[in-house]
Every structure is written in C-alpha cells, then in structure tokens.
Image: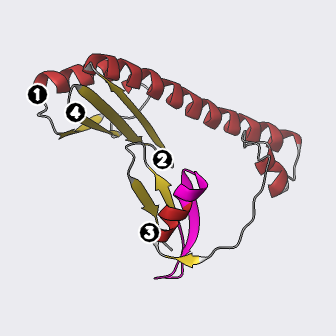
Amino acid sequence: MKYVFTGKNMNLTDAVKEKTQQKLSRIEKLFSESTEAHVTFSSVKNLYKTEISIQLHKRILRAEVSDYDIGVCLDSLVDILEKQTVKYKTRLRERRRRKQATHEEINFISEPEADAGENDAKIIRTKRFALKPMDAQEAVMEMDLLGHNFYVFRNSQNDEVNVVYRRNDGEYGLIEPLY
C-alpha cells in the first residue's frame, strides 16, 4: 500500500508517519500494493483529527476520528476501515456466488430480478418536491430554516440541480453534478 500524508496546522514527523504505517499494516493485506491511502492529520489546540481515505475500484473507504492522542485516533481508524473493507469484500463475494448459482440453475435471468437481491438497503419512503431556482446562499438559508443537513435546489446561475450540505466542521459544502 502506498501512503500520501498531509498535515494541517501541524508538522508531520517521521515518527508519526512510521507509527501510522505500523498501525495500518494490520489491514494492508486486504488491499493490493498499488492502493493509495490518503492520510490527513490536523490539529486544533490539543485535539487531533485524523482522516484516512482509500480509493478502491468503484468505492471510497473513508474514516475520520478526533481525539487528544494520535495513537488512539489511529487505532480507531484501523478498526473502522477493517470493518468497512470486510463488509465490502463480503458483499462482492456474495454477489459473485449469487450470480454463479443463478446462472447454473436458470438459463434466463431478467435484469430487474437480479438487481433486486443485490441491494441490502431498503427504501421506506419516497419524497417528491418542486425545485425552486435559487443561488447557493439562499439554499443554505432554506436548509438552516428547515433544520436539515442538506438541501436540494435548482441553481439559478446554471439551471442545474445542486445540493448544499452541512459539513462535520460546521461549514457548508456544495455538490454540483458533472455530465
């Protein structure tokens, strides 16, 4: 596994980098050698925030932990990433096994039936609403008035559907689609 280290508001020493690689060696066997792990450390007063992002084929595994000790952050991150990786790889294995079993038993499979069993998420409610044209600042204000963490709107500047959301650090983000 390859590592890309970034430090915000702090200097990263070789000891911190080595300790990170040592802790992550526990889950290295789950990834290929060409996989990149982006590790970001930031410090605000005495609180350390550690974030790791690992790009897989079509997925991004991401974990973020804040604590007063970097070692505790790294241990928690490794636990989170290990659970995410095992869950992802188990799903892939089950999909492959399900596809092989259905192809052996049945010659013809319709697409909707094959996709229905693969998704573990169950949608229990569908919500429809009209998209009002507005700018991002208005959307943030609407989101705050509603008390939501995100808000979908039609951007009046480019006439595309956008999403504003509240980040964990209290700031706001804007999602714009690429076509």
Residue labelled with disc 3: 137
> As shown in the figure, which amino acid type bears the numbered disc 4?
Ser
- Mark 1 residue crowding within 10 angstroms, few (<14) / some (14–19) / many (20+): few
Q: Secondary structure at mark 3?
A: helix
Up the image or down, 19 lies above or below 135; here it is above
| Residue 177 position in % (x across, y down) | 50, 69
Q: In front here: 155 or 178?
A: 155
Instruction: Give the distance between the C-alpha atoms of the residues marked 1 and 3, in whole angstroms.
Output: 40 Å
What residue span does the magenta drawing correspond to?
A: 143-163
Q: Which of labels 4 and 3 is toward the front?
A: 3
Query: Residue 159: horizontal and vertical position, in percent?
Result: 53, 82
Position of 11 relative to 73 (above/below): below
What type is the residue that disc 2 sits on? His
Mark 1–mark 2 CB contact (< 8 Å)? no
| Numbered badge on residue 13 | 1
User: Which residue is nearer to you in this view: 72 or 131?
Assistant: 131
Which dot marks residue 43?
Answer: 4
Dot in front, 1 or 3: 3
**Residue depicted at x 36% and y 18%:** 75
Residue 75 seen in the current view: yes
Q: Nearer the viewer, mark 1 or mark 2?
A: 1
* C-alpha gap between disc 1 and disc 2: 31 Å
Q: Secondary structure at mark 1?
A: loop
Is 135 in the magenta?
no
Q: Quadrant of residue 93?
A: top right
Task: Find disc 2 in the rendering and name its residue.
Answer: 57
Q: Secondary structure at mark 2?
A: loop
- The color scheme shown is secondary structure
Q: Earlier in the sequence, mark 1 or mark 4?
A: 1
- Work out whether residue 177 can be spotted: no
